[in-house]
Image: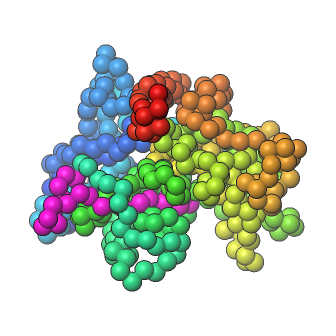
Amino acid sequence: MATKSRKESKEYVLKMAKEHDVKFIRMWFTDILGILKSFAITVEELEGALDEGMGFDGSSIQGFARIDESDMMALPDPDTFQLLPWRPKEHHAVARMFCDIKMPGGEPFEGDPRYVLKRNLKRAADMGYTYYVGPELEYFYFAFKKDAQGRVLDPREPTTEALDQGGYFDMVPLDVATDLRRDTVLTLEEMGIGIEYSHHEVATSQHEIDMRYTDALTMADSVMTYRLVVKQVALKNGVYATFMPKPVFGINGSGMHVHQSLFKDGKNAFFDAKDSYHLSKIAKSYVAGLLKHAPEITAVTSQWVNSYKRLVPGYEAPVYLSWARRNRSDLIRVPEYKPGKENATRIEFRSPDPACNPYFTFAVMLAAGLDGIEKGLEPPPPVEENVYEMTDEERKKKGIGTLPPSLWDAIQLTEKSDVVRKALGNHVFDAFIKNKTIEWDQYRTQVTDYELKKYLPIL
């Protein structure tokens, strides 16, 4: 299918805005931490914005710019135009578009997460590949504190009180979240995002809605939309949704397993009918690159202090650097091949969590895999046994390493990584490392409830 020119896309947006009586358009973009940012323009400014972009102060955006170089332009991508279903539609509707951030002279801003991903996708394209991803984002629904009449006391103060006691794929008759998931799926589909599955996850009050596989840039935009929609629908129903990786001690945390593949000339470059795993040499080199660089990309794919409370043995989160077909304790899983489904051949990278910056996460995973392809790396033998049940000695004998156990360990590995620096670019790399180091320093100097309960009575 031929892609529309920017002129055609612009005309379509102006037509849609008129037809749907759109008054406000929200300009969406993200900071280096993957937090969604937005400002609104009126429909009268829309044509000018599509042609030249809208100016804003970048010095107030995390990781963007210093005060002396703060002037920036947000240039909306007309292909991302969508009406916001939760805003009034009959009169003065509201739409959104994702933006590419530019410098005043029109050149791309190196700190824009969308631009970072685009650069890495161009590297893949120059090698003949298109990068497809299908992330599975898990999240929790929690209750707010309410008064005697059932009114929310403070929407800024959610609890970690579960809404249900359901488990994996459970159909609980009184599960309030069934309707929440349904409304969320309908809203996402209304915004042009294809959905494959939605179900209850393993932990109590934990859920998952899986978006349909697509190209990485479209998917990164969709992840940002997905997170907002999940929260928006929850708030509308008086509950709180969180993508925090490990909000509750003692139960599973939330992951974002990312299914991925490369296509070349319209065919899946990961498929090989003759291989026992149905994986091509390219796919295996991609796996080898991911395994080799997994520790150094972990600060990006699991970027918060809390991320490492999830990455511990015993809760289905991957910790060990291994790959296999059936084994869900491995970092990389190869889903079973179904005859006639060559295009579905893929690998699943299981360490990222849903609170990551999706633009950076897709960029560093792709960079690690492409490095494996360029260098012709070969992965170690697959491990079908349960890696968690092995002794340290058995894992050492098989050469199975581990992911970094804390954000600080992860930062130190990332700091030395040429692969990550090249993928993110110097501006983002330096700003990201600085930001994460500050976060770690703030965390390690805190006195926690755990310490007070453990030490205060005895010391």
Quarter-wise, where is residue 239 in the image?
Answer: bottom left
Residue at 26% from the left image edge and 58% from the top image edge:
144
Residue 373 falls within the magenta-colored stretch: no
Q: Which residues are magenta?
A: 131-155
Relative to 356, does residue 13 appear above or below in the rendering? below
Query: Where residue 436 sits in the image (x, y, percent)?
Result: 48, 30
Relative to 275, does residue 23 appear above or below in the rendering? above
Query: Where residue 310 sits in the image (x, y, percent)?
Result: 55, 49
Query: Where residue 398 sits in the image (x, y, percent)?
Result: 86, 47
- Which residue occupies the extreme top position in the image? 68
Residue 132 falls within the magenta-colored stretch: yes
Left of 200 or right of it: where is 395?
Answer: right
Decide if residue 225 is in sight here.
Answer: no
Query: Where residue 350 sits in the image (x, y, percent)?
Result: 62, 54
Left of 46 or right of it: where is 161?
Answer: right
Residue at 79% from the left image edge and 53% from the top image edge:
390
Residue at 30% from the left image edge and 61% from the top image edge:
143
Decide if residue 157 is in sight here.
Answer: yes
- Which residue occupies the extreme front position in the image? 458
Left of 395 or right of it: where is 87?
Answer: left
Residue nearest the viewer, comparing 127 with 260: 260
Relative to 201, does residue 375 appear above or below in the rendering? above
